[in-house]
Image (tube, rainbow, N blue to C red):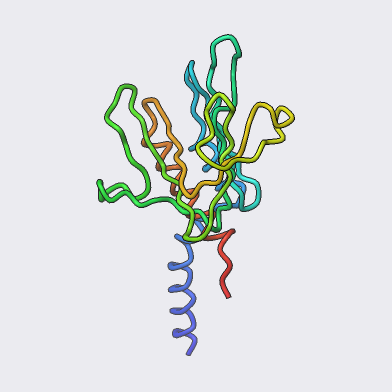
Amino acid sequence: MRNFLNAIALCCGVLASPLLADEVTREDLIAQIEAGGRNETSEERREVKVEGCTLSTFRWMNVESEGWVLWTSFTVPMATVGLEENSLTPEIDHYYILEVEPPASIVVLKAKEGTSFPHEKPFHRTPEGDFKPSPRGDGTTHYFESRETGIIVQQGEDVQAKAEMFTKGYIRYVREYCTFTG
């Protein structure tokens, strides 16, 4: 019996050791998602923030004579917004790489059926339908539209690594912290 118990303990230790080596905290996953969503060029800056189970994206454009203007922002309820699967390139699951100069990646955010999320834009961009004024600029500079899809675009030499970091972190974070199971 003692040998049997030792064998079980050894087996459990072997099985558990890879799991312990892969232990990632909530803060680690948030840092991974935010680092994967950060990008800056001379014309634009991109950033993502995770707070609880809400992801906020920000894209600022350097507008002549105005400076940095918030050009687009999504507020995504992570439990109801997934990442579109890449059907074009089987080895890449949830993002697209564009062969342009500089290289670019695209991650598509897609709301589950029957849900949507707010998309904030400046009035520099004409509203496409129904909209509500944003509290930003006292409702005079930005507005909200409702969306079922949105994209995160990155540019630069390291975009594939950033897209991989973002998508893997997002999927794992949602599974571990935003999905309710009974």
Q: Position of residue 170 (x, y in %)?
A: 50, 49
Viewer-nearest residue: 116 or 27: 116
Res. 119 image quadrant:
top right
* Quadrant (top left, top right, bottom left, bottom right) of the C terminus: bottom right
User: Is 100 drawn above or below residue 53 in the view shown?
Assistant: above
Res. 64 image quadrant:
top right
Question: Most extreme residue toward the bottom, as rendered?
Answer: 1
Question: Most extreme residue toward the front, as rendered?
Answer: 129
| Residue for point 47% across, 90% down | 1
User: Is 129 drawn above or below residue 12 in the view shown?
Assistant: above
| Residue for point 39% across, 30% down | 158
In this rendering, position of residue 93 left or right of residue 181: left
| Residue for point 32% across, 49% down | 86
Q: Position of residue 138 (x, y in %)?
A: 74, 30
Q: Position of residue 151 (x, y in %)?
A: 44, 40
Question: Most extreme residue toward the right, as rendered?
Answer: 138
